[in-house]
Image (cartoon, helix red, strand yellow):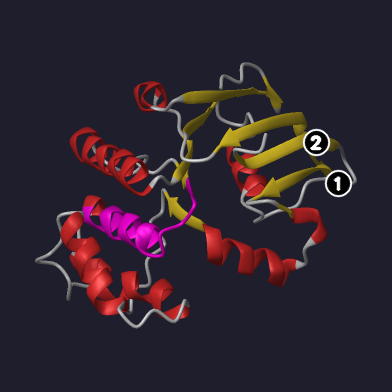
């Protein structure tokens, strides 16, 4: 497992209330190799997004452990997990999560500036050019289409050259043609920058483009393929 950038062992997530106990994930173990592309698939409610959140350290499991970039997330406090994510991880969400008050260029510059990159403006401009938005640098999110906003989100995610990119239904709000372009872009950048791509998707065609798939059913891992 030395070439694995993410390792999960006996991962479970249980939510308890006065009425009932709900098991969202049940004893999930997996390993994801560096620079690979992996789809997390399954029906709605199967635990896909919860698994993604646990692997990224956005949430903690009820039991089990996750090793991300060589660190056991359970050994870290919230600030340390955030620092680890800032150093190693990028995110692309279905909802884009751009800052409305910033231009496309400023949205992509933000993580670079937080990293202290002196070339933040040039790198952000280069990335937006790379994703086909060279003429949209000064546009605000409200002035961009859904597909254009998602391209800005992808440029931002890749800006700090993350070791791992987590994508949660990245084409879910897009039409088929735009979604195809976004998908091509994700895989191009995955290949060019050797970024590990971990993607939650309900799109079977998208899953088939990944090197392997992790299939969840009612919180259990059915068919991991390496």
Residue at 68% across / 47% down in the picture?
Answer: 54
Residue at 61% across / 16% down in the picture?
Answer: 223
Residue at 73% across / 67% down in the picture?
Answer: 78
How packed mark 1 is, by other alpha carbons closer than 10 Å (few <14, some 14-19, many 20 or more), is few
Magenta residue span: 148-166
Residue identified by numbered label 1: 17
| Residue 9 is one of the magenta-drawn residues | no
Percent across and percent down for residue 120 are: 32, 77
The answer to whether mark 1 and mark 2 are in CB contact below 8 A is: yes
The quadrant where residue 103 appears: bottom left
Q: For numbered disc 1, what is the local secondary structure?
A: loop
Percent across and percent down for residue 167 are: 46, 45
Is 146 or 64 nearer to us in this picture?
64
Residue identified by numbered label 2: 22
* Left or right of residue 188: residue 112: right
Disc number lying in front (1 or 2): 2
The quadrant where residue 66 appears: top right
Secondary structure mostly seen in magenta is: helix
Q: Residue furthest right?
A: 18
Is 149 or 22 nearer to us in this picture?
149
């Amino acid at each position: 497992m030395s070439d694995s950038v993410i390792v999960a062992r006996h991962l479970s997530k249980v939510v308890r209330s006065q009425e009932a106990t709900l098991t969202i994930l049940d004893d999930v173990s997996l390993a994801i190799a560096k620079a690979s592309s992996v789809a997390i698939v399954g029906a709605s409610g199967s635990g896909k997004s919860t698994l993604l959140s646990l692997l990224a350290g956005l949430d903690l499991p009820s039991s089990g452990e996750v090793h991300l970039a060589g660190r056991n997330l359970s050994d870290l406090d919230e600030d340390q997990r955030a620092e680890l994510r800032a150093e190693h991880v990028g995110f692309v969400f279905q909802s884009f999560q751009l800052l409305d008050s910033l231009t496309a260029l400023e949205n992509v510059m933000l993580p670079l500036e937080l990293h202290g990159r002196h070339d933040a403006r040039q790198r952000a401009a280069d990335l937006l050019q790379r994703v086909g938005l060279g003429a949209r640098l000064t546009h605000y999110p409200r002035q961009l289409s859904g597909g254009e906003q998602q391209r800005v989100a992808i440029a931002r995610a890749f800006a700090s050259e993350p070791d791992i990119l987590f994508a949660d239904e990245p084409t879910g709000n897009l039409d088929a043609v735009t979604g195809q372009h976004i998908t091509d872009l994700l895989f191009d950048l995955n290949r060019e920058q050797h970024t590990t791509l971990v993607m939650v998707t309900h799109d079977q065609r998208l899953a088939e483009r990944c090197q392997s798939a992790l299939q969840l059913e009612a919180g259990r891992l059915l068919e991991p393929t390496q």
